[in-house]
Amino acid sequence: MTRSERKRLRSGIGFTSLWIVGLAAFTAYPVVASLYYSFCDYSILKSPVWCGLENYHQLVRDDLFWKSLRNTLFYAGLSVPLGTVVALGLAVLLNCEVRGRSIYRLLFFMPSIVPAVASAMLWLWIFNGEYGLMNGFLNPILAPFGLHAPTWLADPAWSKPALVIMSLWGTGNAMVIYLAGLQNVPGELYDAAAIDGASAWQRFCHVTLPVIAPVVAFNAIMAIISAMQLFAQAYIMSEAANGNGNASDGNPARSTLFYTIYLFSTAFQDLRMGYASAMAYILFLVTALLTWMAARLSRSRHGDAI
C-alpha cells in the first residue's frame, strides 16, 4: 500500500469513525448482548444468571407466545399480499399518461409519511363502531339486508382485519418503488407484444411482471419484515379502542396481542429481559426464514432475474 493510499484510508476511517462507533455501541453490542441474555435468567435489577436453554424451553410451553406468533403471522399473511396488489395497482395507474399525474402521485404517497401515532388516531375515528366513518358508509348499504357493520377494533373477529386495512394506508413507499421499476421497462417490449396481438392484461403478465420481478421481490421482503415487527399502530389502537389502559393485553380477547407487543410487555413491564431476548431471537429466525422463502420463491419463478 502506497503512502497516498494509506493517507486516503486514514481519512476515510476518520470521516466514518462516528458512524463506526455508533454502529458498535448501539447495534452490534446490543445484538451480541441480547444473544447472551437469551441464555440467562436476567431481570435488569439483578445480574444475569446463566440458565442455558431454559428460556427457549419455556417459550415452547407459553400459550401467549404461540398466540402472539399466530396473530402476527395472520396479519402478515393478509397485509403483505394485499399491500403488494394495492401498491402495484396504484403504480400501474399512476404510470399512465394522464393530466395532473404528478398531483395524483403526491396525494397517494403523502399518507406513507404521516407519523404512526397520528395515523393510528385517525384510523381510530374511522373504525369507531358507533360514529366512525367506515360504519357511516357501510351501515346504509347493509341495512336493507338486515345486517350491521362490525365494531372493528372492539370485535375479536375484525380487529386484525381492521389493522390490515389500515396497513394499506401506507403503501405509498412501495408504490414509488414500483413506479420506478415500471418506468424502466423497455417500451420496445410492449410494442413487440402489441404487434403479436397481446392484450393489455397479457402485456402486463408476460412483459411487465417478469421485468419488474426483482422490484416485486424486494418490496415483498421489506413488507414481510415490516409486518413481523408491527407494534406502534396496534399498541395505540388497542389501548384507545378498548379503553382498559393496558394495550399489552392485546384486547379484545388478545386478538391484537402481536409478537412485538408481547415482547415489549415481557421486557419492560414484567422485567424478564432474558426471556424477552430469547423471544427476539425467535422473531429474527422466523423473519429470516420467511424472507428466505420469499427470495427462494422469486428465484424459482424468475430464474436469474433476482
Image (cartoon, rainbow, N blue to C red):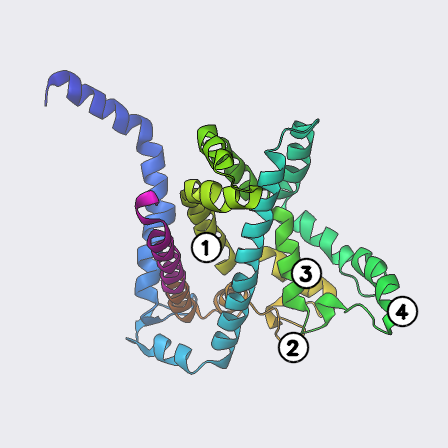
Residue drawn at x 73%, y 70% as measured from the top left = 154
Residue that numbered label 2 is attached to: 253
Q: Is residue 91 above or below residue 43?
A: above
Q: Is residue 145 visible?
A: yes
Left or right placement of residue 94 versus residue 46 in this view:
right
Residue type beneath disc 1 = Ile
Residue at the disc numbered 3: 237
Q: Which secondary structure lies at badge 1?
A: helix
- Label 3: state its secondary structure: helix
Mark 1 or 2, nearer chain start: 1
Q: Nearer the viewer, residue 125 or 145?
A: 145
Spatial CA distance of label 4 from label 3 is 31 Å
Q: Callout 4, which amino acid?
A: Pro
In the drawing, what numbered circle is on residue 225?
A: 1
Q: Nearer the viewer, mark 4 or mark 3?
A: 4
* Mark before the other along the chain sequence, 3 or 2: 3
Task: Indicate which disc, 4 or 1, sits on the residue closer to the N terminus.
Answer: 4
Label 3, residues with CA under 10 Å away: few <14, some 14-19, many ≥20 = many
Image quadrant in which the N terminus is located:
top left
- How far apart are the two marked residues, 2 and 4, measured between alpha carbons? 31 Å
Real-space CA distance between mark 3 and mark 2, rounded to the nearest whole angstrom: 14 Å
Q: Which residue is mark 4?
A: 144
Q: Does 135 appear above or below 120? A: below
Viewer-proximal residue, 94 or 109? 94
Residue 78 in picture, x, y percent from top left: 56, 62
Q: Residues within 10 Å of mark 2 (few under 14, many from 20)?
A: few
Mark 1 is surrounded, within 10 Å at the Cα level, by few (under 14), some (14 to 19) or many (20 or more) other residues, namely some
Residue 298 lies within the magenta run = yes
Q: Position of residue 170 (x, y in %)?
A: 61, 47
Disc 4 to disc 1, C-alpha distance: 42 Å
Q: Which of these two is toward me, 146 or 63?
A: 146
> For the point 46% across and 45% down, which residue is it?
206
